[in-house]
Image: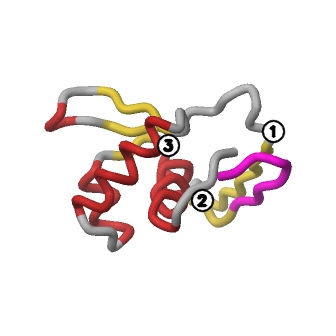
Amino acid sequence: MKKLNKNERVILEFIVKNLKVKLSDILNNTGIQKRTAQRALKSLIEKELVDASGTTSDREYTRVFNAQDSIIKLVVFMNGVLVGSLHYGEGGV
């Protein structure tokens, strides 16, 4: 997996946990500044880790899993609420 900086890792993990997010979701939940988040998202898209869909004002981001991503993620729900997750394997987030 390509090397990620701290902001890219935080945003990618947020996308993984929430499946589909908008820029406003990232800004409201990570503390990352708007321009920094935009640069990180652009980099994640270029690294083929994230996909963007929709118009500029209504864009949504989702995680892209590639054949070389050998990671398994187990999630734990309690009463319909995500309470934990476990990642293992050779892949990244």
Q: Residue visible at 42% across and 41% down?
A: 20
The correct choice, above or below, for 46 with respect to 74 in the image is: above
At label 2, the amino acid type is: Leu
Circles 1 and 3: CB distance less than 8 Å? no
User: Is residue 67 something that shows in the picture?
Assistant: yes
User: Is residue 63 something that shows in the picture?
Assistant: no
Region in magenta: 85-93
Q: Which is more N-terminal, label 1 or label 2? A: 1
Q: Is residue 64 left or right of residue 39?
A: right
Q: Given this view, does label 2 or label 1 mark the residue nearer the observer?
A: 1
To which residue does mark 2 refer? 82
- Disc 3 element: loop
Colour scheme shown = secondary structure
To which residue does mark 1 refer? 70
Q: Residue visible at 67% across and 29% down?
A: 66
- Disc 2 element: strand
The correct choice, above or below, for 71 with respect to 12 in the image is: above
The correct choice, above or below, for 80 with respect to 64 in the image is: below
Q: Residue visible at 26% across and 68% down?
A: 33
Within 10 Å of disc 3 (Cα), the crowding (few <14, some 14-19, many 20+) is few
* Position in image of residue 30 (x %, y %): 38, 69
* Position in image of residue 44 (x %, y %): 47, 44
Q: Quadrant of residue 3?
A: bottom right
Query: How far is disc 1 from disc 3 in space, using C-alphas?
Result: 18 Å
Circles 2 and 1: CB distance less than 8 Å? no
Q: Which is more N-terminal, label 3 or label 2? A: 3
Q: Given this view, does label 2 or label 3 mark the residue nearer the observer?
A: 3
At label 1, the amino acid type is: Ser
